Amino acid sequence: MTDSSASPASPLAGVAARAADAGRLMRRATYASVAAAGFLIVAKLVVWLATGSVAILASLLDSLLDAAASVVNLLAVRQALVPPDREHRFGHGKAEPLAGLAQSAFIAGSAVLLLVEASKRLIAPAPIAHTGLGIAVMALSIAVTLGLVAYQRHVIARTNSTAIHADSLHYFGDLLVNGAVIAALLLAQWLDAPLLDPLFGAAIGVYILYRAWQFARLSLDMLMDREMPDVDRQRIRDICLSHPAVRRMHDLRTRVSGPHRFIQLHIEMDGDITLLQAHAISDAVEDRLQAAFPDAEVMIHQDPAGIKERRPHFA
C-alpha cells in the first residue's frame, strides 16, 4: 500500500474535510427523515380515525415503517461514521447494509398487515367518511415528502450514502402511495364504489413488498462485497493506464462498505526503474484515484512488467 499521507499541496489534502462534511450532511438527512415521518404519522392517524379508509391506513402503515426505518438509519449512519479502531480496521460501514436489511423486514411486515386488512374490507366493504379531509392531508403529505426527497437527493449526490439512498427510495415510494390514496378517495367519492378503497390498498401493499425486495437485494450486495459498478471499474482502469509509466493494470478488486469504498489493484511498470521511482509512480496513480473517488481507500501493489505471478490474477 502506498503512503496515504498528504502534504497541504497534495490532492489528498481535502479528503478529511470532505469526509467530515459528508458525515454532517448524512446526520442531518437522518434527522430530517425522522422528523418528517413523525409529522406524517400524526396527520395520517387523525385522518384515518376520521375516515376509516383502508388506503389511508396503507399510507399510515407506510409512514410508521418509514419512521422505524429512518430511526434505524439514524443509528446505523452514526455507527458507520465511527472511525476505524483496533477491532474494526476497515471501519464500521457495514452498519449501513445491516440497517437496510432491517428496513426490508419492516417494510415487508407492513405490506403483509396491509394486505390482510384490505382482504377483510373486500369481504365486508364500508363507506369512507370525510374524504375531503383525507385528500387535504394526503396533499400535505406529498408536499412534505417532496421537500424531504429533494434534500436527500442533494445529500446522496454529495456523500453516495447507501443508507440515505435507501431512505430516499422509501419516501419517493411514498409519493406514489400518497398519489394513489388521493385517487382512491376521489374515485370512491365520485363513483360510490367502496370496493375501490381496499383494492387500492392491496395494490399499494404489493408495491411495498416489491420495495422491500429492492432494499434487501441492495443491502445483501454490500454485505457480500459485490464489486463496484462496471462504469466505475472502467474509470479506475482508465486512470491507472493514463499514467505514462504504467504498462498494465490487473487484479482490480473493489467493494463498498457504507459511505466508504475500497479499491485494490496491481500496476505493472518497467522492471529496471528504482524502488523509489516505482513508489513515486504509485503515489501519483493513487492521488489521481483518490481525486476521482474521494471516499475510497486505495491500495496499490507494484509489479515489474512481464513477470508472471505465482497465482492467477483477475482483470
Image (spheres, rainbow, N blue to C red):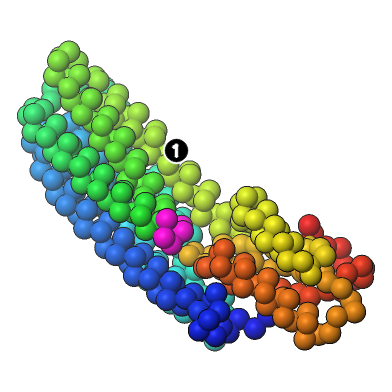
> Which secondary structure class fits the magenta region best?
helix
Looking at the image, can residue 249 be seen?
Answer: yes
Count of marks overlaid on the render: 1
Image position, residue 201 (x, y; %): 29, 30
Image: 43 above or below 198: below
Image: 278 above or below 25: below
The quarter of the picture where residue 25 lies is bottom left
The span picked out in magenta is 157-164
Image position, residue 103 (x, y; %): 40, 53
Q: Secondary structure at mark 1?
A: helix
The quarter of the picture where residue 251 lies is bottom right
Image position, residue 199 (x, y; %): 30, 24
Looking at the image, can residue 110 be seen?
Answer: no
Residue at 46% x, 48% y: name it. Answer: 215
Is residue 253 shown left or right of residue 119?
Answer: right
Work out which quarter of the rendered image holds the C terminus and state it: bottom right
Is residue 135 shown left or right of residue 93?
Answer: left
The residue tagged 1 is: 210
